[in-house]
Image (cartoon, rainbow, N blue to C red):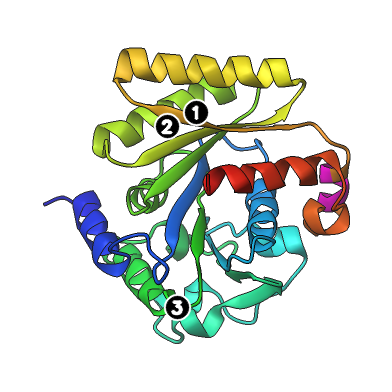
């Protein structure tokens, strides 16, 4: 049994089924960086919480933490303390908004960027202690195909692959879907287009990825939707907050609410 299979077995034991007592485990990923993934995760978490759902975000970009920076917070403890055995995950969890908590990673620590399979298994195992605290666990993975990224993806029940209209982002999104499907064909895969110039453009890109995945990989990919370019998003980034919180009536906020609904359709 390989390392990925060990992780899949562990996640099934930790979160055996989606029910009222066990959270859905959804990883959000992308083939390349710069597609707005982390800001989308934060916005999506805030939107889901408005439906009276409890959300925990795991910052799985372990060596280059993003979520705490994006929110302008300085966690006292992070996953580095968990790996060192000084703290448990339940000790480092932080509330950021009503209904939304995060498990912070750390920046500039090489040890976290290159975890062993055993260390990744330990993190997932400790998530078991949070089963009663969340309805949905969002895993914000780093872009690319590092061992950390792939193992956290394979330990999830669903994966949202983010792409933009850039050719490299589209190509890398398809490559990510290809890698995931080769390792585990049972994971539900969503495609979501971010920072689109128009609805037509977003739908064409998503349709192309879905059809290509079906034709060449025999994999069913579902469209989660799209988010158009919106000035409130970079403004929220500068202010280190979620656009849903700062601009609740913006187009981006309304659209993210629809994405949250789609997840629970």
Q: Is residue 14 left or right of residue 242?
A: left
Which sits in the foreground, 54 or 117? 54
At which x and y percent is residue 188?
38, 40
Residue 197 in sight in this render: yes
Kindly give the residue lying farthest to the left in the view shown. 1
On screen, residue 238 above or below 227:
below
Reading the image, the residue beneath label 1 is 173
Which sits in the foreground, 171 or 197? 197
Q: Is residue 12 left or right of residue 237?
A: left
Reading the image, the residue beneath label 3 is 132
Reading the image, the residue beneath label 2 is 176
Q: Is residue 86 magenta?
A: no
Distance of label 1 from label 2 (alpha carbons):
5 Å
At which x and y percent is residue 107?
60, 63
Label 1, residues with CA under 10 Å away: few <14, some 14-19, many ≥20: many
Q: Is residue 235 magenta?
A: yes
Q: Is residue 18 left or right of residue 192?
A: left
Q: Which of disc 2 and disc 3 is earlier in sequence?
A: 3
Kindly give the residue lying farthest to the front in the view shown. 265
The residue tagged with tag 2: helix, strand or loop? helix
């Amino acid at each position: 049994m390989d390392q990925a299979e060990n992780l899949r077995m562990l996640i099934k034991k930790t979160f055996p089924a989606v029910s009222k007592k066990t959270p859905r485990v959804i990883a959000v990923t992308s083939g390349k960086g710069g597609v707005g993934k982390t800001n989308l995760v934060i916005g999506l978490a805030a939107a889901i919480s408005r439906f009276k759902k409890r959300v925990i975000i795991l910052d799985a970009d372990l060596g280059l933490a993003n979520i705490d920076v994006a929110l302008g917070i300085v966690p006292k403890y992070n996953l580095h303390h968990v790996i060192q055995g000084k703290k448990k995950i339940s000790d480092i969890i932080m509330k950021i908004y009503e209904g939304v908590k995060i498990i912070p990673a750390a920046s500039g620590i090489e040890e976290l960027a290159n975890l062993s399979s055993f260390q990744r298994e330990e993190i997932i195992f400790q998530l078991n202690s949070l089963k009663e605290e969340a309805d949905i666990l969002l895993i914000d993975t780093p872009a690319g195909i590092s061992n950390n990224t792939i193992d956290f993806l394979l330990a999830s029940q669903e994966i949202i692959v983010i792409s933009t209209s850039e050719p490299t982002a589209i190509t890398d999104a398809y490559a990510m879907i290809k890698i995931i499907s080769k390792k585990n064909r049972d994971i539900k895969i969503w495609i979501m287009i971010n920072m689109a110039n128009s609805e037509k453009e977003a739908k064409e890109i998503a349709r192309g990825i879905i059809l290509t995945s079906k034709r060449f990989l025999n994999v069913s990919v579902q469209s989660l939707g799209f988010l158009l370019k919106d000035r409130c998003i970079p403004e929220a980034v500068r202010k280190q907050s979620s656009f849903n919180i700062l601009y609740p009536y913006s187009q981006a906020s309304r659209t993210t609410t629809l994405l949250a609904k789609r997840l629970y359709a």
